[in-house]
Amino acid sequence: MKLDHHFVRTLERLNILAKRILLANIAGQRTSRRKGASIEFHDYRHYSPGDEIRYIDWNIYARHSALFIKEFAAEEAVHVALAIDTSLSMSYGRPSKLDAARLLAASLGYIGLANFDAVSLLTFTDRLVAHKTFLMGKGRIFELMEALERVAPEGKTDFRSALRLTLPRLKGRTVLILLTDFYDVENYREALKQLLAQRVQVHAVQVLSEEEVAPKLDGRLVMQDLETGRERELYISPEAVDLYRRRVQGFLDEVQRTCQDLEIRYARALSREPLEEVIVRIVQAGILEVK
Amino acid sequence: MKFFAPAYLWWLALAVPIVLAYFYRTRRRRVVVPYLPFWDEVTQRTRRRFAILKIQDAAQLAVNLLIVALIVFALAEGHIEGVTRRPVQHWVVFDTSASMQAEGRRERAIAYLEEYVSKSVGAGDEMMLVGTAGWAIPLARDVGSASRVLRELPGGVYPELGLAAVLRVLGGRGRVLVLTDGQDAATPPDAVTVGQDVPNVAFVDLRVDSQSSIVEATVANFSDQERRVTVNIQGAQRAVTLGPRAEEKVFERVQPGTLKVFLQEADAFSLDNACYAVVERRARPKVAVVYAQALNHFLAQALRVFWEEGVIESTAAFQVGDAARVPEDAIVVYDHVAPPREPPPRVLVFGGPGARVVENPTVLTGNFSVRVSAVFDEGEPMLQALEGSLAVFRRRGDRSRIDIGFRLDDTDIQLTPWFPMLLRTAIDRLDRARTFPEAVPLGRPVCNLYPLDSETVEVTFADRIKLSQRVAVREGWVAISNHVSPGVFQIGSEQVTSNFFDRDESDLRPKVKTRTPAPEPLPWTAKVPLTAWAAGIALLLSVAEWGIYHRKG
């Protein structure tokens, strides 16, 4: 897994959108509403006993004989959690959806690291696993990519049980980017709601392969479900393929609509698409912003 | 079940690729999908069709295997005991000797052949009609066409190979049915004899005395009853009464030329009711030429050659002023001179412009008439030369005449390359040395009367039998074997006649046994063509299979 040099330069001009979620105690590059120790002037206030004398503006005191303290804006970091669906269905397609998700996670992770955000790598199937947490600084990108390469597909997606128990430290202060195919049709909506209830800002990137969106199948086939292993002998006619395409499109529209309802930024990525195009689409979806 | 051609059973191996193709086509391909429930939902409607498809595939395999089995059955000639039999070759040997020309014999042969075909000839059988003359004609298996071939066989006498020779050749080949009148000594005991007692009267001899021009025709009665017949010799009718198995001679003086002697009221064996002869001329003609200014050089040259060859006795030339000196018995040639109002009997006129000149075409008048003959129709060429017709029969009212002549321009007759030949033909015709048709005496080899210039001639026999053959001409003479059909035939441009019937053949003795049972008819089951049915069903199944499974749209 490699990121192109020029592409990396492009990524450095992007930033992950985080809406009023800044990670306290960790200095970053994002300007916080809280006052801090950055060089950016924020406001004046009357001196109170106990304030540091070095922040008194002596020029104002000379003109008005009153003590005012200069306040500066605090620069804070965001915790970006990249949650990759590693269920077996993500191993489908050439290249596999998981490969595409890995590349995408590396790109998003690099964006976060480049902006002095804290980046965590999580995977989930029916449970959430933290592989790397709170990586900071561009130098940690290799650590992140190494962790991504170790990620292997297994198990079945179960959004509810996987996302029910999030890491306590994520609560209320994390931008969670889901990289998944959403093949837990019954439960994904509830799970997303559950996440939002924990005041986690969620972005969703639905990763799909071209083979599943527009399959080229016909005749008599024994189909096996990648996740459950269930088999069924089916006769696939052109009419059935057409119906399937419409069904998949309906599902994609439904996921998109659900995300819109829940105010979750949503983007779609095909595994065979060039990464640059996917990033552009993610920018258009509002998950990333140009600095 | 037996197979007459078991080698074809190897073709059953064709079933192997068909079965393999079936398994390949209906193999289950295994594919993985990320989310099966979507496919479950959308294939609800096609599940029933899938079940039907499975049945269709199995049915198609069964049909394909059945087609192979049927084709192999047909090729291997499947035979079910009691239902089918092996195809048989039937050889119908037909006696073509002269005696079979007797009235009723061919009809009886046809009737028996029809019965035989309907009872014994089955599908797949082959049938060949073989004449004792040696020819063979394949016959169709249906009754109508078989009998039609036999009915349309040309009449006349063929050169006989003989029944014994034919049976020897056919020995051991299929079933042989012999249709004969039993005259041949080689008639096998199981032959079907179709002969019967024919009260036959025939000419058995014809002699011509060239000195006296008297014809002696001997007519015989072969039956046991007294017969009264009329003999026609050059138009003269002589009534003759013939006792049982008796002969009578008839004498008649005749003119030189072709002679046809025939019985009026022909009997049941018409072949020997006529015979032909040639009455040779007694003296060579004299030829006189009457010319206007100068004797035509080419005419004189041609006459000189004729004189040297002995065709004419003498020639003489007269200017038009000396025409009164022309001898009365000579053939007079008027060369561009108008003939007198009452010309001598034998006149040849070469036309030219001027008063009283005979119109074109130049006409040769002999002041003779001929009887209306059935042989020639009016306007029909009687003698055909290379350049066109030389002699044409014409009739006006009761009078008939034969015009001999050729188209002449008013100049340059010498430039006509065939002029000498035409001149000679005209002289012969005026001298009655050559009539039409020419003939040869009974029993003699056919030959042309004059030496031929060519090295080979094309001989076309009469009766519209298309038997053409090239015959070598040696020293100007052509000889043909005796085995030719009676009647008129043609050698190049010459028409000659002959009669070569066998005297023994015309002696039709009564036949005691007129029919011998033929071989037992083959069983009716022969008519069940299992191989044909198998092939037909295979074809139908193939078409149906294609229509159901492969036709697009």
Image (tube, helix red, strand yellow):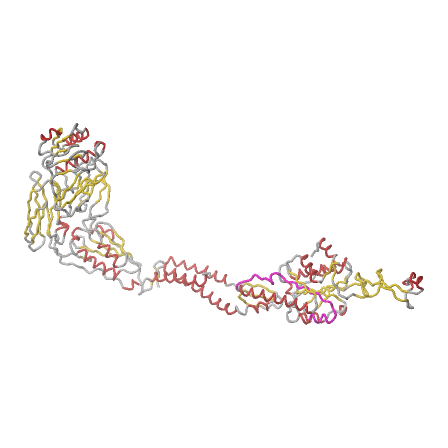
From the viewer's perspective, is residue B206 above or below residue B521? above
- The spot of residue B429 in percent (x, y) is 14, 38
- The spot of residue A218 in percent (x, y) is 54, 62
Q: Residue at x 70, y 55 (%)?
A: A2
- The spot of residue B420 in percent (x, y) is 19, 33
From the viewer's perspective, is residue A17 above or below residue B163? below
- The spot of residue B226 in percent (x, y) is 6, 54
Q: Is residue B64 visible?
A: no
Viewport quadrant of the C terminus of chain A:
bottom right
Q: Is residue B177 left or right of residue B60?
A: left
Residue B105 falls in which quadrant of the image? bottom left
Q: Is residue B72 left or right of residue B233?
A: right
Between A17 and B446, the one lying in front of the other is: A17
From the viewer's perspective, is residue B360 above or below residue B503? above
Residue A187 falls in which quadrant of the image? bottom right
Q: Is residue B83 visible?
A: yes
Between B202 and A8, the one lying in front of the other is: A8
Viewport quadrant of the N terminus of chain A:
bottom right
Residue B379 falls in which quadrant of the image? top left
Q: Residue at x 68, y 61 (%)?
A: A101
Q: Which residues are magenta?
A: A191-219
Which residue is situated farthest in the top direction here? Answer: B294
Q: Is residue B478 left or right of residue A207?
A: left
Which residue is situated farthest in the front direction here? Answer: B355
Between B306 and B263, the one lying in front of the other is: B306
**Does the magenta segment cover residue A57?**
no
Q: How many marks?
A: 0
From the viewer's perspective, is residue B347 above or below residue A165? above
**Does the magenta segment cover residue A200?**
yes
Between B29 and B454, the one lying in front of the other is: B454
